[in-house]
Image (spheres, grey):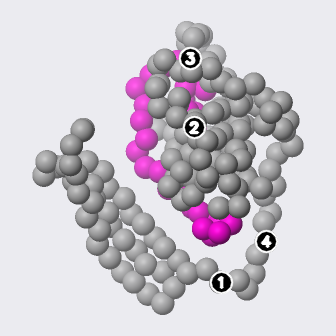
Amino acid sequence: KDGEYAVHTRLIRGGKHTQHWSIEVVQQHVICSTASLITGMRRADFSHQTTQAPKVPDWPDCPPTTQNKFLGWLNCYDFRYVVGHPDFTSAEDGELHASRSVMWVNDAPSRPLDYLSLTAICDSFILRLLHLRKAFVPMGTVSLTTHFMGSRAEIATQGTDPLLGVSDAMRFHGNFHDQHMQFFGK
């Protein structure tokens, strides 16, 4: 809601290399949101990346997604889908469709990437159930876990360039489903 709110943080456990924090956002004496934050100290002793970005057309070669009147928050991003563009116009046809999406994404308006903007972008994928069923059915995010594998300096090298994102799901069951995303930068 509009108005003042407070963020309460509490260190749950701290050690030599990690800290576990509990966070609450409170407004009008009501907890609106909770989070768990785990931090870790990085060491420069080993680095290896087994996952590679998929081969896709470059950002300028992909048409931008038009403004979305159903989900206004999507207009905070410039999406360029390569695979799995969401279909907000068709009715559920009883078929199950692919749940995988590959897209370029950037803040709109563009801004230098930092932890805050990367956190928001990590929650920018449309829920996989919409892709699978091509229908608006009750759905929402129960939990979101984001792992930052880059340091502040590494993330800053991305500048205002878009990120390539891949999202898919492995199981839809009992009114819940998973969704996993990966982002690739420079």
Question: Where does the image place residue 90, in percent across and percent down from the top left?
Answer: 59, 10
Dot 4 or dot 1: first in sequence order is 1
Q: Name the quadrant of the N terminus.
A: top left
Q: Which residue is mark 1?
A: 43
Amino acid marked by disc 4: His
Question: Where does the image place residue 39, in percent across and percent down from the top left?
Answer: 48, 73
Dot 3 or dot 4: first in sequence order is 4
* Distance (Cα) linking label 2 and label 3: 23 Å
Question: Where does the image place residue 5, in percent across and percent down from the top left?
Answer: 22, 51
Residue at 70% across, 44% down: 162
Picture quadrant where residue 104 is located: top right
Judge left or right: residue 17 versus residue 153. Answer: left
Label 2 neighbour load within 10 Å: few <14, some 14-19, many 20+: few
Residue at 67% across, 48% down: 160
Label 1 neighbour load within 10 Å: few <14, some 14-19, many 20+: few
Picture quadrant where residue 25 is located: bottom left
Residue at 52% across, 44% down: 123
Q: Which residue is mark 4?
A: 48
Q: Which residue is mark 3?
A: 88
Residue 122 seen in the figure: no
Amino acid marked by disc 1: Arg
Dot 1 or dot 2: first in sequence order is 1
Judge left or right: residue 43 versus residue 40. Answer: right
